[in-house]
Image: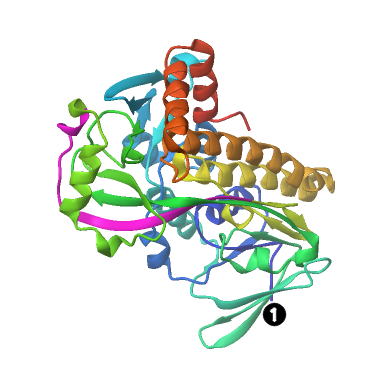
Amino acid sequence: MMRTQVAIVGAGPAGLLLGALLGQAGIDNVIVERSSAAHVLSRIRAGVLERGTVDLLRRVGCAVRLDAEGLIHEGIDLAFDGALHRIDLKHHSGGRTVTVYGQTEVTRDLMEARSALGQQTLYEATDAVLHDIGEKPRVTFQKDGREVELACDFIAGCDGFHGVSRQSIPASALRQFERAYPFGWLGLLADVPPAGDELIYARHERGFALCSMRSSSRSRYYVQVDASDRAEGWSDDAFWDELRRRLPESVAGQVTTGPSIEKSVAALRSFVVEPLRHGALFLCGDAGHIVPPTGAKGLNLAASDVHYLFEGLREFYGERSTGGLDAYSAKALARVWNAERFSWWMTSTLHRFPDQGEFGQRLQLAELDYLTQSDAAMSALAENYVGLPL
């Protein structure tokens, strides 16, 4: 039998960041991941980082490349009615900005730092089962053809929406809140320069579009599609044509096309479970909540969960106090629901809904028109977009 203080299920950025913080504080931890390291790094995800997330990465010494290569954005553009409207995030949020740096790169930096320190990550550990999570937790799994048992004080469930952690909690102990949206995002990644210096969120009668980037030479674009659409049904040329239709002419003319590196459709949903703790098991990130990507909150919410959980664990092992752990769920959920509200608002304001009709479309335009003319409204958007304090 293996033994550790904290067993972390999932080697995505949440699990790796928690492991880095715990290791720095001298708290022993083992990460158990069902996939290979290569598969973890192959996941294409968002890359807009709040300052709180960047600060956490700097704290654990994993921000050298981020500081060198990350793109500091002081604003975003909203496109509607054929025109572009810039929201000055820095001005309207008291000087705060966001950093564009791909989630894959965050994972790579954390992974390499963990390996260099000799901290243990067990990849391709399949068939994980969580035992006795109410009192003396254990995790069993298959590794290299044999069953391994890992005893621990606590389990951090950082294994995503489809992971085993949340499913190990009795249904009667959880409340679930969910909203599924009747559309998805078709995303395309290409090695082409971005259409603008900052992200462009476009509301169009044909549907939403987003111009984003991973670097000055790699772009990520999205268009709203029907929930039933599949990436295989879209050629690259069809994607580029549809994207440009939804952008103002001045922006469409700046779109550089090229062959896709990756193309996929992501469903949109809002999802929260309460509480985020059951006994010795704590849920972090997508294991406990999902937000639509419109507000760029997914990775940042996972980082804030990790921050709160780490502080509770540090207090427990350093002061033998359970106060931080007992407060974890309520503290994390307060921030989660704020992000859910903001992401829902962004999604509702910018997307074409099947049943909204002309009245609903006019309301969207009125909302956007007010937003771009009101300092108070722009401040509210900026404050939420750059991220509320941890």
Q: Is residue 373 left or right of residue 272?
A: left
Q: Along the line of sight, which residue is nearer the eye, 353 or 39?
A: 353
User: Most extreme residue toward the bottom, as rendered?
Assistant: 145
Residue 349 rendering spot, x and y as whole percentages: 47, 32
Residue 20 rendering spot, x and y as whole percentages: 56, 51
Q: Is residue 136 left or right of residue 83?
A: right
Q: Along the line of sight, which residue is nearer the eye, 227 or 87?
A: 227
> Does residue 62 show up?
no
Residue 286 rendering spot, x and y as whole percentages: 57, 54
**The residue stretch that appears in magenta:** 251-271
Q: Amino acid at mark 1?
A: Met
Q: Along the line of sight, which residue is nearer the eye, 303 or 358?
A: 358
Picture residue at 69% right of the left edge, 80% below the top: 1
Picture residue at 52% right of the left edge, 88% below the top: 145
Quadrant position of the C terminus in the picture = top right
**In the rendered image, which residue does mark 1 sit on?**
1
